[in-house]
Amino acid sequence: MSDSLRPNVSPYFRIKWYVDFIITFPFQVIVVLLMLLFMLLVKLTSKGPVIYKQVRCTKDDKQFNMYKIRSMVVDAEAGKGAVWAKGNDPRVTTVGKMMRKLHIDEFPQIWNFWRGEMYIIGPRPERPEFVEKLNKEVPGYQYRTLVLPGMTGYAQINLPPDTGLEDVHKKLVLDLEYIEKASFWFDVRLLIGTGLNFIRFKQFDKSALRLIGVARNPEDSPWAEKVGLMEEHQSLYLTPKDIKPET
């Protein structure tokens, strides 16, 4: 892989975890309270464990257990294995739909953050089953793991969930751009953007993100051409028949 696809890691990452902890401390309290509330709702409305874990890839392709509140029926992946997301997944519970809309099912990852396995803001961690394939098919994908993953990120507040390789290309563009230009004030604005998406209940409406300077179309990034986000690379993308739901 050409070194031209390797981003220059921002020196901010040397202190980033400590800064994340300090500037998000009040929000961590809110996260824990909401997490406990929804854990109780899941316990009261469906059978099975409230918390489950998934193996994800972190910095340098090491693996760790990432925690979530269960939003699907028990054994949703039995016999199918890891698959991508799609709308109106019948395996998602009623409470799970609400949690997924607001990303509350992701809140137990605050434990991963406290353990030093994640940042608050950074590239989202992917499952090893997908990473092996994506490292082969998406140029530069392996460089996402030059830093720890995050609970939220530049790509997550600007783009919807992945349904195929074209979406992976788009998020990769913003992940690599973030790795290069991460800074204290950029992270503060991304935190505000995450909060605005949460409060408005309407994600990916970029008018609010534009006001704070974090709205970004991947096609406008200098990384777009580098990672192949162009028409001539459409052959790399998955066709509709390849798209499958995720847990």
Image (tube, rainbow, N blue to C red):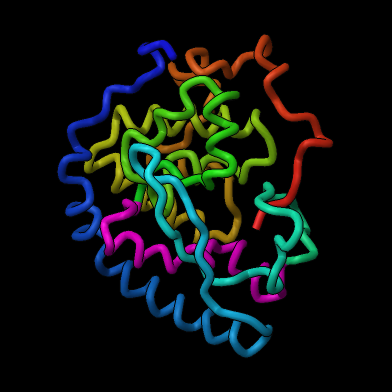
**215, 57: nearer the viewer:** 57
Q: Residue at x 48, y 28 (%)?
A: 141
The residue most toward the front is 79
Q: Is residue 76 left or right of residue 111?
A: right
Q: Residue at x 65, y 76 (%)?
A: 95
Q: Position of residue 181 (x, y in %)?
A: 29, 29
Quadrant containing the N terminus in the rendered view:
top left
As drawn, 64 above or below 42: above
Q: Is residue 142 left or right of residue 240?
A: left
As drawn, 112 above or below 172: below
Does the magenta portion include 199?
no
Q: Is residue 228 left or right of residue 238?
A: left
Which portion, as a residue range, is magenta? 92-120
The residue most toward the bottom is 44
As drawn, 122 above or below 197: above
Q: Taking the image as drawn, is residue 70 in sight?
A: yes
Q: Taking the image as drawn, is residue 199 in sight?
A: no
Q: Position of residue 29 (x, y in %)?
A: 31, 74
Q: Position of residue 232 (x, y in %)?
A: 67, 9
Number of labels in the image equals: 0
Magenta-drawn stretch, dominant element (helix, strand or loop):
helix
Q: Residue at x 38, y 49 (%)?
A: 150
- Residue 6 found in image quarter: top left
The residue most toward the right is 241
Does the magenta portion include 96?
yes
Q: Is residue 146 left or right of residue 232?
A: left
Q: Position of residue 2 (x, y in %)?
A: 41, 11
Q: Residue at x 52, y 74 (%)?
A: 51
Quadrant containing the C terminus in the rendered view:
bottom right
